Amino acid sequence: RSLEPAHKKIIVAVINGELTVKRLHKINDNLYLLPENDNFEGMIVREEMDFQVWGVVTHVIHST
């Protein structure tokens, strides 16, 4: 939790009680969470949502 979430960073967030990992975009004072996978839809973060950033992704481990 020591890194600040910033535009175009991948974050771990909780939205209305559900965990998600998405890329954060800040456009014209609006926050958008956009997936890297085209099979999923992005979302705009609205004031009425229970939204909390848990952290910023710094490393990814893939199995080959």
Image (spheres, rainbow, N blue to C red):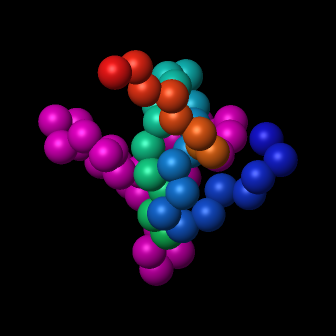
Number of marks in the image? Answer: 0
Tell me which residue sits at (61%, 63%) in the image: 6
Residue 50 visible, this angle: yes
- Residue 29: x percent and y percent? 52, 74
Q: Is residue 23 magenta?
A: no
Q: Is residue 36 magenta?
A: yes
Residue furthest out toward the bottom: 28
- Residue 50: x percent and y percent? 58, 36
Q: Is residue 8 above or below residue 60?
A: below
Residue furthest out toward the left: 39
Q: Quadrant of the N terminus?
A: top right
Tell me which residue sits at (31%, 46%) in the image: 36
Residue 31 visible, this angle: no
Q: Quadrant of residue 32?
A: bottom left
- Residue 3: x percent and y percent? 76, 52
Tell me which residue sits at (49%, 23%) in the image: 18
Locate residue 34 relative to residue 24 in the image: left or right: left
Q: Nearer the viewer, residue 1 or 49?
A: 1
- Residue 13: x percent and y percent? 57, 37
What's the magenta region? 27-56
Locate residue 19 relative to residue 55 in the image: left or right: left
Tell me which residue sits at (44%, 51%) in the image: 23
